Amino acid sequence: MTTVIDGKALAEEIITSVKHQTDKLKAATGITPGIAVIIVGEDPASQVYVNSKSKKALECGFHSVQHNLPEQTDEAELLALLDNLNNDPEIHGILVQLPLPKHIDEGRVIQTISPDKDVDGFHFINVGKLGTGETESAFVPCTPAGAMIMIERQCGKDLSGLNAVVVGRSNIVGKPMFNLLLAANATVTVAHSRTKNLPELARNADILVAAVGRPQMINADWIKPGAVVIDVGINRIPAPEKGENKTKLVGDVDYEQAFEVASAITPVPGGVGPMTIAMLMANTLTSAARIAGAPKPQF
Ligand code: NDP
């Protein structure tokens, strides 16, 4: 019987835990976790993401600030805002919604965020910590952090003896996923667009993570019977069966096919997606607890 890993329910569980642990932190230290979310420009999809992050933060009992900056904001202005937020004692997490307009150097912006408030986990210090196995003190990027919790729930925290294959090597998903799996003692292979014999490689995986951005690329033939399949991909494709000009979201895995072979699988939508915001809240609480000298929250 294949388990469908319900990301919505798991994300709700994490949010409930964040709320409880936030109340405890407030009672013990008087500190309220604070998050600042910054968006530059009017991209509608980014606006939706940012609004839902700010809303979720309020739901968690956080102090939440949103900065909506116009498209023409210059880099110096954004860097000055980050400097203020880095020094603001009420803010424990800073998130800059990507992508930024072309005239702003994204790398410089990310590296200006204090590593102690870098709840997205993109600063070199946090990347370096994760890469050297300092998973306890690093901020881990939210999507792979959420995927890892899903894997732990299926396979336990120690993945000794298990083969994991991650398809995709981005800095946001593939590489941090590799580091998390390695830190949990899995034997990990990272595949990408130049990899040869990808289906054969994937068939070796007890844990298969897809983070490619190609709709339904991975079919049953790629999956070892009994594997745990984590589909990070979010792709919009035409859905003529729903009516003219209608679309739907699918993952990088052909869900119907994979369901027949895997022991557990994440659906799209409703799988890894909802975990990302939940982990952002978890990281912000962790940051506040660190600054307060309180024990690290557990999820
Ligand atoms: P990127 O485009 O940054 O990276 C894609 C990776 O897939 C690259 O490493 C690329 O290889 C590899 N790739 C591309 N084509 C192939 C192929 N034919 N065979 C093997 N590997 C291939 O994407 P992201 O990592 O940012 O995102 C991946 C997916 O995850 C997307 O669908 C995205 O929407 C989704 N996503 C979902 C999130 C969520 O759930 N909240 C958050 C972030 C992403 P190469 O390096 O050689 O080019």
Image (cartoon, grey):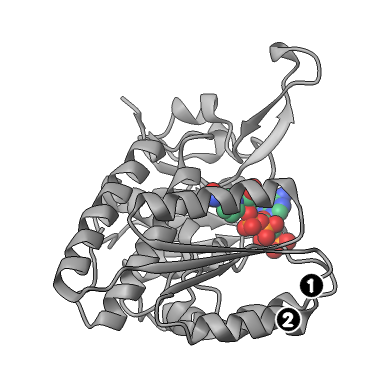
Picture quadrant of ligand 1:
bottom right
User: Viewed as shown, does residue 54 lie left or right of 154?
Assistant: right
- Residue 159 vertical position relative to residue 209 in the rendered view, above or below: below
Which part of the image, by quadrant, shows the N terminus? top left
- Residue 114 vertical position relative to residue 259 in the rendered view, above or below: below
- The amino acid type of the residue labelled 1 equals Thr
User: Viewed as shown, does residue 6 lie left or right of 45?
Assistant: left
| Along the line of sight, the residue nearer the viewer: 288 or 77 | 77
User: Viewed as shown, does residue 51 lie left or right of 226?
Assistant: right
For residue 195, say whether it is visible.
no
Q: Secondary structure at mark 2?
A: helix
**Residue 146, position in %: x, y?**
41, 54
- Mark 2, Cα crowd under 10 Å, few <14 / some 14-19 / many 20+, is few
Name the residue located 40 percent from the left edge and 82 percent from the top edge. Answer: 89
Q: CA distance from mark 2 to mark 1?
A: 7 Å
- Residue 256 vertical position relative to residue 145 in the rendered view, above or below: above
**Residue 56, position in %: x, y?**
43, 50
Name the residue located 48 percent from the left edge and 33 percent from the top edge. Answer: 267
- The amino acid type of the residue labelled 2 equals Glu
Name the residue located 47 percent from the left edge and 35 percent from the top edge. Answer: 270
Residue occupying the far left of the picture? 28
- Residue 117 vertical position relative to residue 48 in the rendered view, above or below: below
Q: Secondary structure at mark 1?
A: loop
**Residue 37, position in %: x, y?**
55, 64
Name the residue located 35 percent from the left edge and 48 percent from the top edge. Answer: 150
Ligand 1 within 8 Å of the CB at mark 2? no
- Mark 1, Cα crowd under 10 Å, few <14 / some 14-19 / many 20+, is some
Check contact, mark 2 vs mark 1: CB within 8 A: yes
Q: Which residue is mark 1?
A: 73
Which part of the image, by quadrant, shows the C terminus? bottom left
Q: Which residue is mark 2?
A: 77
